[in-house]
Image: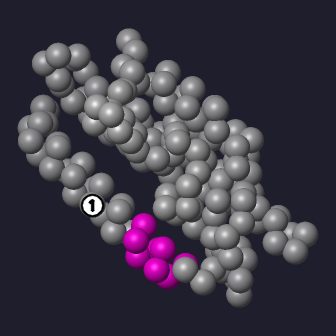
Amino acid sequence: MRRNPMIHDLYHEIGSWFHRWLNRSRARRTAEWVRVDAVIRNARARLVLDDETNSISIGKLFEWRPVVGYEYQVENTAYSGVARGEIWYFDEDGALDAAESLVGATLPVRYDPSRPSKSFYLPQDGGPPQLNPAIPDAGSGLVVISLKK
């Protein structure tokens, strides 16, 4: 079954809007939480859609999202969490390379001081670029994405 490209684009626009709204909501709720640097212990690339999207110019596209497992310390106790990056990898090798490059990197997370096991990663706090959507070049306004075969 082929997807209508317009519906596919609409789905992603709604999904992106929802993620931005969720991040803003979390940022408000966690504004008083403690911010700490976590260490990314493992990372993988997750296939977001297992259906194919066809493009006239480049053929079949698959969408990938980096997913990381992180660890942070609060009063000599280790806690862990999971964070998902934005969809902007369209080839498996690029997604896997990006995920592997994240292991060992630091990730700013916020945890609830009354319940340190509860934490969130907010893109607004920064973090490795592989977890955030590509940012347009200030000079040209273009986003450069490499598509490998």
Identify the residue at horizontal 64%, vertical 32% (top origin): 101
Q: Residues within 10 Å of mark 1 (few under 14, many from 20)?
A: few
In which quarter of the view is residue 139 placed? top left
Image quadrant containing the N terminus:
top left
The answer to whether residue 133 is above or below residue 56 is below
Decide if residue 67 is on the left or right side of residue 50.
right
Callout 1 secondary element: helix
> Which residues lie in the magenta part?
23-30
Does the magenta-highlighted stretch encompass residue 90?
no
- How far across and down, in percent of the image, does residue 11 sit? 20, 51
Image quadrant containing the C terminus:
top left
Q: Is residue 29 visible?
A: yes
Decide if residue 144 is on the left or right side of residue 54.
right
In which quarter of the view is residue 32 placed? bottom right
- How far across and down, in percent of the image, does residue 40 sit? 70, 48
Pointer 1: what residue? 17
- How far across and down, in percent of the image, does residue 31 sit? 55, 80
